[in-house]
Image (tube, rainbow, N blue to C red):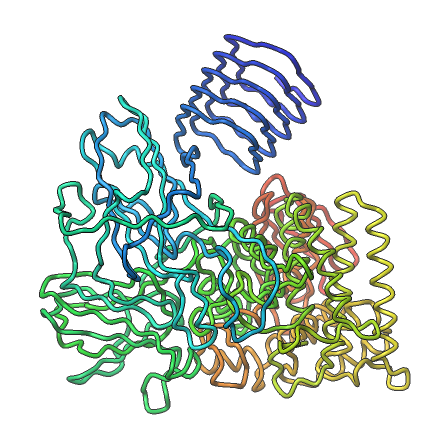
Amino acid sequence: MGLRDVEFRDMELGDVEFRDMELGDTKLGDMKLRDMELRDTELGNMALEDMELEDMALENIALENIELEDMALENIAMEDMALEDIAMEDMALEDIALEDIALVNGNLDNENWIQASEPCDAPYFRKSFQVKKPDKASIAICGLGFYELFINGRKVNEECFIPVTSDYHPRDISNFLYPIKGTFTHRTYYDVYSIGEYLRDGYNTIAVALGNGWYNQKDRIVEGRQSFGEPRLTFHVRIIGEEDRIIVSDESVLWSRSEVTYNNLFFGEKHDLRLKQPGWQLPDFDDTDWENAAAVPPLETQLCPSDCPGDRMIRTLVPKLLYSDESRAIYDAGENISGWVVVNGVLKDGQTIKILHSDELSPTGELDFLSSGGDSQIQAVEYTGNGLQETVQPKFSWQAFRYFEVTGHRNVSGDSPFLCAVVHADVAQTSSFRCSNETLNWLYDAYIRTQLSNMHSGVPLDTPNRERLGYTGDGQLGCRTVMLTLDGKRLYRKWIRDVLDCQDQTSGRVQHTAPFQGGGGGPAAWGAAIVEVPYQYYVHYQDIDILKDSFGPMLHWFEYLESRSEDGLVSYGEPGGWCLGDWNTTQEILLPIPFVNTYFYIKALRTAAEIAEILGLPEEKKRLEETAEQKKEILVRHYYSEEENTFCGGVQAADAYAADLGLANAGMLDALNEKYAAMNEFDTGIFGTDILIRVLFQHGYAQTAYHLLTADGPCSFEAIRRAGGTTLWESFLDMKESKNHPMFGAVTRYLFSNLLGIQYCGKNEIRIRPAIVDGLDYAEGKITTIYGVIEVSYVKREKVIEFVIHCDERISPTLEYGGRVVPVSSGERIVVERI
């Protein structure tokens, strides 16, 4: 049975059974549905309003793009359901059994916050209670900065570094090194778990360990004075059984100090294992020496349930011993990672081992801390032994490193006492790439490794060790590549909210990091995150609500840029602050800062005009397009030389910026191509590198783009590979800069969009337009879209090229090559003559 474009209102249906139904574009309003059974049914694009559903059994239902408003759901069993892109508003969910999906009926208010009764950076909390024959239960919990949750000794949360980081609530920002002022919005995330399986009849114990995280960050050498306060906890437990119960965090909760005597994101942790309290998570533990927690006031924040992936231990590596003597040992993890060293063995009572971490080794084989924060910010972890067999690792911090040094290692007994754990956000790799050029293979692998190790606690970072900040400039530059190669849907949905929260509600300014934790940048290249990231999110995931939520803030940001303009050019930022244009060029930055910032202003105006069209705002679209044209004329008037036929003298790919705005003529493009075809390295910064490669591909100079991507000069990706790099670097030349930095990796997407030719723009009709270049004999790769996977490969033969395209059935690919446009069936082999 298929029902489409149907509207049902004021109906009452009882004892009804629907099987094998497909309902699309259907509206159900003011209905009462009782004793219904739905099986093997697809519900798509439905709006359900003011409905009462009782005693329903729903099995094998696929719900997509459903809006549920003002509904009361009672006594409903939901099994084997897939819920995607569903907006649930003003709903009351009661007595619902959810199997194979997370329990969603947790509640958390802002009234039941507690903390240790005296300052403590890593307290334990426990709450014991009795319950009769528990059947179902859920807990909503927030422990700031990071928490671990146990029930009756079993760990509940597999993820770490949760709740995900945000700009939690207002704090004293008067001592920030970087000037900041304004009014911002704030939110704090909490998590919800189904815990019925953890409870038992009789006595039970909820136990929580807290650490500082970003909430109580106060030791960083730059912007270290940004603590929100001491660690704090709130939870709300609902139990359904023979006796229904509600349990909340209050002063009856007990607390004690843990064995973690120090924890800091930048400097590491110290554990005194002699202070461990075995069994502290269990009901029969003797807690008579513990103290009552202190109640603390509510936060000035919006509490939000989290749908953002936390971090997980992804894999482990066996490190290679490089050097050892009586006092220390130096190991190589084999690749640059984020995570930690796991120690497994017996540490003698009272003896301490110390683990130091670095990206690099000095020429003499010692740890070199220069690129990871310097000697004043060393990532260190210490364990003081208790004479027992232990497996220990950090709880509330990650380290980023390739090499580590252990002092006191002779005190650890065991065959393999050290392992390296790779830890980052639980984000799946959804792409692959291989070709006949090893530099490009390395670029893809290094980018994926770099990007993943820079995704922590819900934020895409610039570095996983030295700064650990969600720079908006880096984020807007790289978001499209992330969404093309990784499953960034949930993480970037959250990070867009961070960007919006960090916008000054008065001026419209967007901060340089989101959540804001210090850091410099520029008004347009960094602030453009408020336009580019929501737009790319819509393109890749077709979520129009993101655009609706962000469009007003975009317009407000444009007002801010006008307030920072002179003679029509975006020329300055905040007084006393940074005003960057391009960044980290291989030599002195020569591009005028107003030129770069006004370029990003124009790009953002044009993107916002597209968004206005998507949202059905034709007048706004027209206004934005007119403003963009006016700004282009101003850019030409200030920076174009008709005599030289170039912008800004052609320095550092200035003409590529102009071409990207449609301001370049054929002669300028040819000169740009000739210039870089003769070079064997980049001379561009983080933005110019991406723009240059894109412009060369788009204007028919694919061979030069390929030449730059595979160049082996000093400022090239091949130079990093030959230097032994396993991740991308912050700088091609400056060895003191970060060795794990994804910003130059934005160009990785051109391996897919141009060399493989997968032109994905959010639609299921995908054009395959490969740029076939000399020097590349074969290439293959895949991406995953919301419509499924598409995989492209080609091999050059003597006179022909063989293409093979595999895709899911919802994708309609078309191959365009050599003037031919060929519809393709999945798995079809297409042979064409080489051009």
Say left or right for 531 vs 445.
right
Dividing the picture into quarters, in which one does residue 24 lie? top right
The mark total stands at: 0
Q: Quadrant of the C terminus?
A: bottom right
In the image, 466 versus 63, the foreground residue is: 466
Residue pictured at 46% horizontal, 67% vertical: 226
Q: Quadrant of the N terminus?
A: top right
Q: Is residue 796 visible?
A: no
Residue pictured at 51% horizontal, 47% vertical: 302
Say left or right for 416 vs 669.
left
Residue pictured at 47% horizontal, 46% vertical: 306
**Residue furthest toward the top?**
15
Say left or right for 524 vs 356.
right
Above or below for 521 versus 624: below
How far across and down, in percent of the image, does residue 398 sit? 36, 65
Above or below for 684 versus 225: below
Say left or right for 637 vs 818.
right
In the image, 236 versus 740, the foreground residue is: 236
In the image, 184 versus 410, the foreground residue is: 184
Q: Is residue 737 visible?
A: yes
Residue pictured at 35% horizontal, 32% vertical: 238
**Residue furthest toward the bottom?**
364
How far across and down, in percent of the image, does residue 224 sit? 44, 72
How far across and down, in percent of the image, does residue 769 sit? 71, 58
How far across and down, in percent of the image, does residue 43 sit? 58, 26
Above or below for 501 versus 25: below
Dividing the picture into quarters, in which one does residue 795 lie? bottom right
Dividing the picture into quarters, in which one does residue 745 lie? bottom right
